[in-house]
Amino acid sequence: MTTGERRPVSSEPPIGREGGRGLRSDHPRPPGACSVRGGRAGPGGGMAAGRGLPLPVLLLVLLLLVQPPGPGAARASRGAEGPSPPYTPDWASLDSRPLPAWFDEAKFGVFVHWGVFSVPSWGSEWFWWHWKGERRPEYDGFMRAHYPPGFSYADFAPQFAAAFFDPEGWARLFEQAGAKYVVLTAKHHEGFTNWGSPVSWNWNSQDVGPHRDLVGELGRALRKRKIRYGLYHSLLEWFHPLYLMDKKNDFQSQYFVLAKTMPELYDLVIRYKPDLIWSDGEWEAPDTYWNATDFLAWLYNESPVRDEVVVNDRWGKDCPCHHGGYYNCADKYRPGTLPDHKWEMCTSVDKMSWGYRRNMEVLQLMSEEEIILELVETVSFGGNYLLNVGPTKDGVIVPIFQEKLLAVGAWLSVNGEAIYASKPWRVQLEKNESKIWYTSKGEDVYAIFNQWPENNVLTLTTPVVHSGTKVTLLGFSGQLKWEEASGLRVSLPVIPPSALPTEFAWTIKLEGVK
């Protein structure tokens, strides 16, 4: 079936999350236009299934039924004479909110991209857009070679079964990896929600595929281990007809925002109380279209997570690196110097994709050494490091991804003192024979190096020492000998490589230096 082609409409009316009947196409339907045929569910067309309601009429009904509890409602609940909220819906006020301390202390988190795109698991998580939006010939060829004629993107959803999804196992893995927070894709740009969103009927994980609340299950498992829980949420949906209508109107209308985006954000916060909201999909429209400042004012003033929640900077096309909580700026962002604002680098073990790919190759994956050195660089420059893995459609984190995560955990078990809750030092990077990265914690300074000197003497030109300076190697007992000579010359232990505390990236702890 080509994009937008319709199939016969069932005589049964749409009925919410209990299942329904409706239209089938490659375009998501307006909320409420349920779509299932022959056991397959998915996005629908532009009229309410079985009722023949034109989209504008359906929209009016939806806007009456689905109104987010915005700041106005919150102010009304406080009463006309109540105190003014601490944050007003403008960037000057919202940007003044201090970042909750837990985020800067966490340093390392795991990102999980999981959705219907995990079923084709080819190309990237942007499969649908590359196939039907850009109409790339290689994607069309892939579909013709592996799927029958007329197979739509919606037909992938029943195969997103999560048959082996073990939230306790995931949480245990992430804990062993040393992650202090985890961010799960609650909804990617395809619009499929990993929870039973009331405005994504029959295009969510409780109606189709797993028939499980994936967001809720993982959250409960993580919180047992005191791991902070973040939810990724895409503001836009590539093919949603209300979004396309707003886009056609040059974003002067807000049908999609009022009927879909905002209700989902409020629902996620109230239902799951996330520690972090990782917003994305902001790049086509300004923050005024997304009602971003109204939502954030409610989040900071009235929501059940107002004291602890953290957000990023993707709230409108002009927001990244300018407004929001911490800054992502761009995927895989590396500033190269110490920024004056808290930031996060997000990257993926698979260099070619954020979602799982069946055809990935070993050389396309980050090595353990690459991952750890990026983590060290990021933390030295004051950032957090968010490392992504993509599970399979069955909910399996494949062994090679597990191996990478466990390697990070093993390294952090020795060197975590230099990472968690650390602060940038007065000098972040020193280049001698090799790069040396610095972090600090209180009065202590940590120097992390990745090239073991041939003569077993490490030279540090930046620290200023005195007679009471103490030098140790994390993971190795006893103090190290040192001398002052054009800086600090540290005599490293003469031991075989197999006896070193880690395979690479070793940490010198300096006490009593300036």
Image: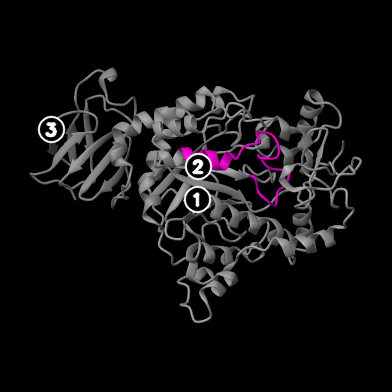
Q: Where 125 sits versus 248, above or below?
A: above
For badge 1, the amino acid type reads: Pro
Query: Can the viewer see residue 334?
Result: no
- Position of 250 with respect to 99 (left or right) is right
For numbered disc 1, what is the local secondary structure?
loop
Label ID, residue 219: 2
- Expressed as whole percent of the image width and height from the top left, the position of residue 325 reads 48, 58
- Expressed as whole percent of the image width and height from the top left, the position of residue 275 reads 46, 51
**Disc 3 packing (10 Å; few <14; some 14–19; many ≥20):** some
The reply to whether discs 1 and 2 touch (Cβ–Cβ < 8 Å) is yes
Label ID, residue 274: 1
The residue segment tinted magenta is: 196-221
**Disc 1 packing (10 Å; few <14; some 14–19; many ≥20):** many
- Expressed as whole percent of the image width and height from the top left, the position of residue 87 reads 48, 70
For numbered disc 3, what is the local secondary structure?
loop
Q: Residue furthest bottom?
A: 81
- Position of 186 with respect to 453 (left or right) is right
**Front-most of residues 291 and 367:** 291
Q: Which numbered disc flags the more N-terminal residue, 3 or 1? A: 1
Q: How is the image coloured?
A: one colour
Label ID, residue 481: 3
Q: Which of the two discs, 3 and 2, sits closer to the camera?
A: 2
Label ID, residue 256: none
Give the image quarter of residue 292.
bottom right
| Magenta stretch prevailing secondary structure | loop
Say if the magenta span includes residue 51.
Answer: no
Query: Can the viewer see residue 277?
Result: yes
Q: Which of the two discs, 3 and 1, sits closer to the camera?
A: 1
